[in-house]
Structures are given as C-alpha cells and as structure tokens.
Amino acid sequence: MARRAAWLIGAGAAAVVAGLAVAQAPGSAPEPQRAIPNPESGRNYATPETLAIQDDDFQNPAFLWVEEGEQAWNHPTGTAGQSCASCHQDATVSMRGVRARYPAYNAAKGRVVTLEQQVNICRTERMGAPELRVDSRELNAMTSFIGLQSRGMPMNVDISGPARPFFDRGEEFYNTRRGQLDMRCGSCHEDNYGRSLRADLLSQGMSNGFPTYRLKEQRVISLQFRLRGCVNDVRGEPPAMGSEEFTNLEFYLAWRAQGLPVETPSVRR
Amino acid sequence: MAAPIGQPRVRLPSQVKAGEVIEIRTLISHIMETGQRRNQEGQIIPRDIIKSFRCSFEGQPVFSMDLHPAISANPYIAFPFKVERAGNLEFTWTNDAGEERKLTQAIRLAA
Amino acid sequence: MQATTLGRRGALAAAAGLVGLSLLPKAAAAQMEAATAAAIRRIIGERTPEEGRVALRLPPIAENGNTVPLTVTVESPMTAADHVKAVHVFADKNPTPDVATFHLTPAMGRAQADTRIRLGQTQDVIAVAEMSDGKLYIGRAEVKVTIGGCGG
C-alpha cells in the first residue's frame, strides 16, 4: 500500500490524485478543494421505500437504538456514579451541533478523535466507566442519540491548524489504491457515483447519515463498520475499527460531506 | 438463552372520535434469527424469533399475527382499529421460548 | 407422495418438476414451487381460492431483500356477518415459504396489515385470504431482489 502511494507521488501526483486541485493561500497550508464541491447525501441514491422508512421517526428501526441511547444517557454508570446527564444535562441542548463538528481535534490527546472515541474518553477519564467497544450496540445507541441532536444541521468539521496533518493522512488513505481490485475510495464514489455496480446504485459515499440502520445488517452500524466493508469489497485488508487510519479517514470523509445536513440516524441499504 | 426481546414502541393517535378507524403502529427490537445462518465454525445458529403478536381491546381480540423467520428483524407491525369507546389496548409479543413482552396503552376519546 | 393430495392434474405437474395450484382457473399458468403449494394446501385443504379482492403492495424492486415493506389489503366490509378471518402470506422461493398469518376481526374496521419481510431472491409473494363465509381469495405480486454490487 505504501509502495503504491510512493509510486503515485513519484509519478506526479497532481495528475493522479483525482480531481484534487490545490489553491495556494499566502502564508498558510494550501486550502484543499473537494472533488465534489456540491455533494449529495446518500438519501438521493436510495429507493422511495427506503426513504419512507427513514423519514418516519416511528418506523425507522434506528430509533430503537436512539431510545436505548437516551436511557443510557440518563443512567449513572462507573465508579464516579455519574451519568452523561450529570455533566451534560439535557442532550437536546448540550449535544446540539456536536455530531456536526466531529471528528474533531482534541488538544489534550494531541490528535483528532471521533465521536465514539470522545464518548469513551468521557467514560474512562471522567466517569470511571469502561470503554464501550467500537460498533457495539451500546456505543451505536449513544452515538445515534447524540447524532440525532444535530439532525438537519450542516456538517462542519474544522481541519485547520493542528488538525490538518490528520486530514492529510485521511485524504491520502482515500486516494490510495488498495486490494486485489486495486481501487481507491474515489474509484466508486467520485468516478462512478450515479452508476450501477451490478444492482447497487453507487452513491457519493457521504457520511452525513451515520450511524445508520443498514438494511443488509438489520441493525444500526457505525461508519467504520461500513469502511471495513468497503475495503473488504475491493478485496483488501481493512484496518481495525477505531484505528488511526480509519479515524483519519473518517475525518477526511466528514470534510468531504461539509455542508450536507446531518441525517443521523438514517436508513441505508 | 433466548435473544432479548427489546423495548416495544406503539403509536396511536392521541385523541380519537368514536367510530373512527385509526392506524395502530408497533415496532419492537428483536434479531429474528432465522435458523439459516451459520456461525464462524460453520454451525447453524438456531432459530430464535418472535413468533406471535397479539392485540386486544379490553380483553377482546382485535388483531394477531403469526410470525415466521421471513419477518424482518425489529418487526414492524401496523393495522387498523375501529374505535367505538375509550379503553385499554393490550399488546403481547411472544418468542419461540414462550417468553412474552407486554404493553398496555389507553385509547382516549376526543371530547 | 405429493400425488395423493394434489390429484391427477397436480401429480402430472409435479412429475414435470413444477407444481401449479392447478385448481386456479385463470392462473393455471401461474406456477409456484411445490413447497409453497404444499404450505397453502396445509391451510386451505382442497378448497379453491378465487383471484381478486386481495391486494399486495410491495416495492417492484427491493433495495435489500432483508427488509421489504409489505401491505396487504382485502376488500371487505369487516362486519360481524362479512369479514376477513385471516390472511396467509407466502414467499414462493424463500427457503421456507411461510411468511406470516394475520388474524383479523371486525373490530378492525378495515382489512389491512403492514409489516416488513425478508425475501431471499426475486420471487412472487402470495397472499390467501379466508373470509368468514368460508370463501378464499388469492393474490400475488413479484418483487425483484437484487444482489448488491459491493458484496451485497
């Protein structure tokens, strides 16, 4: 994988790194420009029946997870005997806008963290509670509940300053060909969105709806669960969920979806 | 040990006129294990589903459903009900092991 | 083995590898799998369902076979004297054909039920309605179920 990337860079990456023109701003890191400047949510690539389920907060099975997350929010856990509500009180107020700006740079940790990781930081460092396993039901329930509080708000992550190196690494991952099928994420989601891959209508791979109730899995899944699936689908070796590579990729993907309204919890096929 | 029967949700309109036909909508969290899937070792994961749903009004049956593994996970079941008077609707979900989850919800008539 | 319950016509069809619910006059060409016919037979015995009155609403193409929304409606006044007692739903090419049975009462005011079903491949979904006067009605609809490109 690194060998491929080096080859690409050596060969004059500007032409190969698809569609990423870089504009120079004086005295600062160049501002990246998106290959898809006006992105579309995955909902535009879903059938009417699937959208009907998503747009109905009663019928949308993800709301079973949201309810569980809400209960967990109010339930004291850990050695400190606190609940999320003990500090954050009413989530509809305190969590408003939070999911829209994650992943985010965490100064104390010196790196970008996802919302899942932030929940676990609170649990382990403030509540004396054990970490929730990534993509576990409990963690997906919590991030669905928190994510809902940003529904409708535009995605808006901050890639400036100390966050920028993590963004760059995520961008590199996105544009690196991998797997037996030798494809990069953009091979499908930039070069071929709107086309059919067998019977699948390819979307632009926007992350604004995650966590999502995936019809295939019949449960709410986290974004990184899907990312593992994508790498498997090109017959590559996927990094672990919660790994640095996927955290940086998730950061890059959030920037790619900048401006799209949060749809958490969505329904996708 | 049977798969957990999760929390049910039931939605009915809050204020109903006598004689009105309303829609009752229900959703419950359950994996609905078909008995077709295999685990990592290649062994069949045994069937474990909600096999029956019943709704009654003041003890009288209104609607019930026999579910088979072909019903999707997190079963969604909706059906009409003609409201004649105020009273309690009782909902019962039963799994293969005979365990039940019940919920009662009141129908109130609009003044 | 099938021959005894299906009669001569059914036996001949079964011998050809496909079983039609050959009692259906118009839909003699509407074949179904042997397992489906047997499942229907288990419920309605030797009685003949008529076509009509049962409507199945399903997406023509299922985005994912795991969760396919289904609405069944039956034309009926749903009075004590004249109502739908039950609707039996089958998926013709699933590993086992039984999907659900809805038990209805006049207290519903209207004969309808909504749920979400799993379909393993492109196939017909078939519904048989039993009326309070013993009449039977049958309806069917095809759903195309696709294999996703990204490994499903």
Image: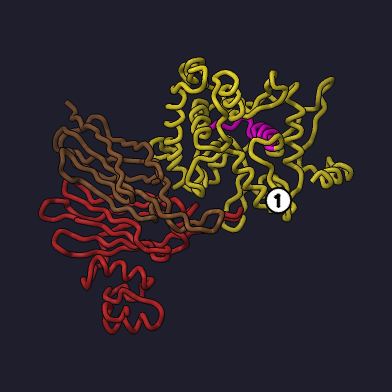
Chain colours: A yellow, B brown, C red
Quarter where residue C88 is shown? bottom left
The image shows residue C75 at horizontal and vertical percentages of: 22, 55
Q: Is residue A243 left or right of residue B66?
A: right
Q: Is residue A66 shown in magenta?
A: no
The answer to whether residue C136 shows anywhere in this view is yes
Q: Is residue A253 shown in magenta?
A: yes
Q: Which residues are magenta?
A: A246-264
Q: Is residue B55 left or right of residue A151?
A: left
Task: Report helix, strand or loop for mark 1.
Answer: loop
Report the front residue among A103 and A28.
Answer: A103
Q: Which residue is the extreme one toward the left?
A: C81
Amino acid type for the residue under numbered disc 1: Gly
The image shows residue A44 at horizontal and vertical percentages of: 54, 43
Which residue is drawn at the image coordinates 53% and 33% (left, top)? A139
Quarter where residue B34 is shown? bottom left
Tell me the quarter of the image containing the N terminus of chain C. Answer: bottom left
As displayed, is residue B59 above or below residue C88? Answer: above
Chain designation of label 1: A
Tell me the quarter of the image containing the C terminus of chain C. Answer: bottom right
- Reading the image, the residue beneath label 1 is A236
